[in-house]
Image (tube, rainbow, N blue to C red):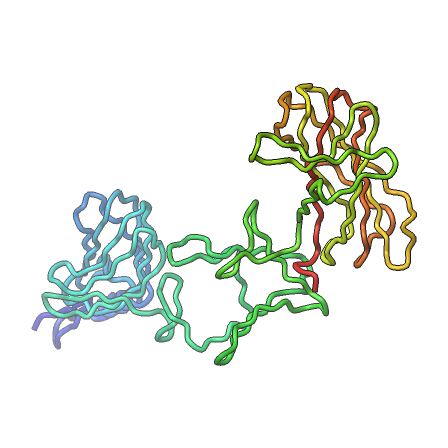
Amino acid sequence: MASTFTDLGIELMATGENAGQWGNKTNANLNLIEQLTGGVNSQAVTDSGTPTALTIADGALTGTAQHRIIELTGSISGARVVTFPLLTENFYIIKNGTSGAYTVQIKAVSGSGATVTFSATDKGYKLIYLDGVATNTGVFEAAIGEANEVTLTGTQTLTNKTLTAPKIGTSILDTNGNELLLLTATGSAVNELTLANASTGNGPILSATGETNVDINLNPKGTGVLKSATAAVKIAGKETMWIPASAMYATTTNPAEAAQVETTALRPDMKVFDFAAAADDFVQFSVAFPKSWNEGTITYQTFWTPSTTNTGNCIWGLQGVSVGDGDTIDVAFGTAITVTDAGIGTVEDQQVTAESSAVTIAGSPAVDQQTYFNFFRDASADSFTGVARLLGIKIFFTTDAANDA
């Protein structure tokens, strides 16, 4: 009876056969077994579109499917197929070492059994099992490691897992791969946000934790505002205060002249102070800044209208002083800051100056103080030849709290 061969090419010698060759053939079988259990084969994948057929060689070490580890190599220009012989029952470690962003499918040489495919970008390893079913061998991918183990390319749901030291990179992406949240690190950070859920009837809490007193800074970008579900949320920052001419009063010394000027009947009348061109005139007003004011410098804009068509420069100035409870009001104003605006050349046209530089309030500004302002036209220094009519001024100040609580 002649020798037979297993489906993996190992020779099964019959009784009485191969006299004098048993040693050689046994050694050949052992070498083949060693190759099947731990050998490595580098197999170039055909780029012609014809499947690359792996082979079994009976009793020889030349079969390309007779190694435990098979590394697929070569440059491919399209999706390619690698086949195993039918009846092959074994497991293999396959490395996709091809170059080119194309899929590589592992299947039986014929039939419609299961297949395993490397994606176009998967250049890693797969552990596969061939079931050896006659005429229709199936190829299955086996998990490397324990069942349900998290893998690099797999999609898994983690349940009841504790991450003892998670490290998240610079961003979190949404399901479309777009940036959802950007993260930055601060050296030696000690303060952080804590998010807590809540029981029925209560809202979840986002709180600052770390040191004893910690702010939460929410910074809109550009002209954006911070909003709740129904309205904008007030935040600390730059604020404005409108002071109309009607809220001012002429000074006892060198006063500007209060007037009401009609444009056309039943059109807007203007409540103004007229500042003459011949001498410096003055008006005053006072405000109690909100508690949220940071007691710092302010700036202002002048709203005015010309009484003539002259286009010379009109110079406006503002100075202030704060007075607290029990302090004397008989105090000097701080340094005046001026802003210059050229006449527009048309009577009764609205004019608005640029924002001034910083005005420092004299005294020691603090909560619950009254701030007195002295406003004037520096006619002795400007070149506007007509009466300049003041409509009002807009004061800009900065808050460092969202409210006055």
Residue 21 seen in the figure: no
Q: Residue at 79% x, 58% y: name it.
A: 367
Horizontal side, residue 33 vs residue 5: left or right: right
Quarter of the figure that contains the C terminus: bottom right
Q: Is residue 360 above or below residue 106?
A: above
Residue 196 seen in the figure: yes
Residue 285 coordinates in the image, percent (x, y): 78, 45
The quarter holding residue 192 reads bottom right
Residue 327 coordinates in the image, percent (x, y): 91, 55
Q: Residue at 87% x, 42% y: name it.
A: 333
Q: Residue at 72% x, 57% y: name it.
A: 292
Horizontal side, residue 90 vs residue 184: left or right: left
Residue 108 coordinates in the image, percent (x, y): 16, 61
Q: Is residue 352 above or below residue 118?
A: above
Count of picture labels: 0
Horizontal side, residue 348 vs residue 136: left or right: right
> For this rendering, which residue is in front, 403 or 47?
403
> For this rendering, which residue is in front, 151 or 76?
151
> For this rendering, which residue is in front, 378 or 98?
378
Q: Which residue, as the protein is rendered here, is positioned at the far front?
A: 265
Q: Residue at 68% x, 32% y: name it.
A: 304
Residue 105 coordinates in the image, percent (x, y): 23, 56
The quarter holding residue 78 reads top left
The quarter holding residue 293 reads bottom right
> For this rendering, which residue is in front, 115 or 368?
368
Quarter of the figure that contains the N terminus: bottom left
Q: Which residue, as the protein is rendered here, is positioned at the far left?
A: 1
